[in-house]
Amino acid sequence: NLLTMNPAIGWAALGVILLIAEVFSTTSFIIPFAIAAFLTAFLAWMLLLPMGILWQGLLFAVLGAALIPVCRRLLLRFSSKTPDINQY
């Protein structure tokens, strides 16, 4: 039953779904939200989040928004520096 399920399983499942979506989108925009879902799942699993699902959702949203610039900076640092073939 979904109503009695451990919230950590739901957050981990959302993280997997977001990673699969990232593989198909290749935009690198979904990665921070997948990481935020996995962090929320980990915190819920460690029982550090004895709060309701609404507070967990708020934590997920805040973590996702906070991880956008961090992931962008990391992706830009480790991306290839090959020149664009369309520039003359």
Image (cartoon, helix red, strand yellow):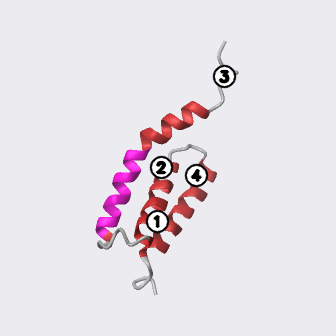
How far apart are the two marked residues, 3 and 1, measured between alpha carbons? 40 Å
Q: Is residue 47 left or right of residue 28?
A: left
Q: Position of residue 44 (x, y in %)?
A: 40, 70
How far apart are the two marked residues, 1 and 2, measured between alpha carbons? 15 Å
Amino acid at the residue labelled 4: Glu
**Disc 3 marks which residue?**
84
N-term mark: 3 or 1: 1
Amino acid at the residue labelled 2: Pro
Q: Secondary structure at mark 1?
A: helix
Dot 4 and dot 2 residues touching (CB under 8 Å): no
Q: Quadrant of residue 69?
A: top left
Q: Secondary structure at mark 2?
A: helix
How far apart are the two marked residues, 3 and 2, measured between alpha carbons? 26 Å
Q: Nearer the viewer, mark 4 or mark 2?
A: 2
Q: Position of residue 67 (x, y in %)?
A: 43, 46
**Disc 1 marks which residue?**
42
How far apart are the two marked residues, 4 and 3, measured between alpha carbons? 23 Å
- Give the answer, above or below, for where 17 lies relative to 63: below
In the image, the segment drawn in magenta is 54-67
N-term mark: 3 or 2: 2
**Residue lying at 38% horizontally and 72% vertically, measured from the top left:** 47
N-term mark: 1 or 4: 4
**Residue lying at 49% horizontally and 37% vertically, measured from the top left:** 72
Amino acid at the residue labelled 1: Phe
Q: Residues within 10 Å of mark 2 (few under 14, many from 20)?
A: many
Q: Position of residue 24 (x, y in %)?
A: 63, 52
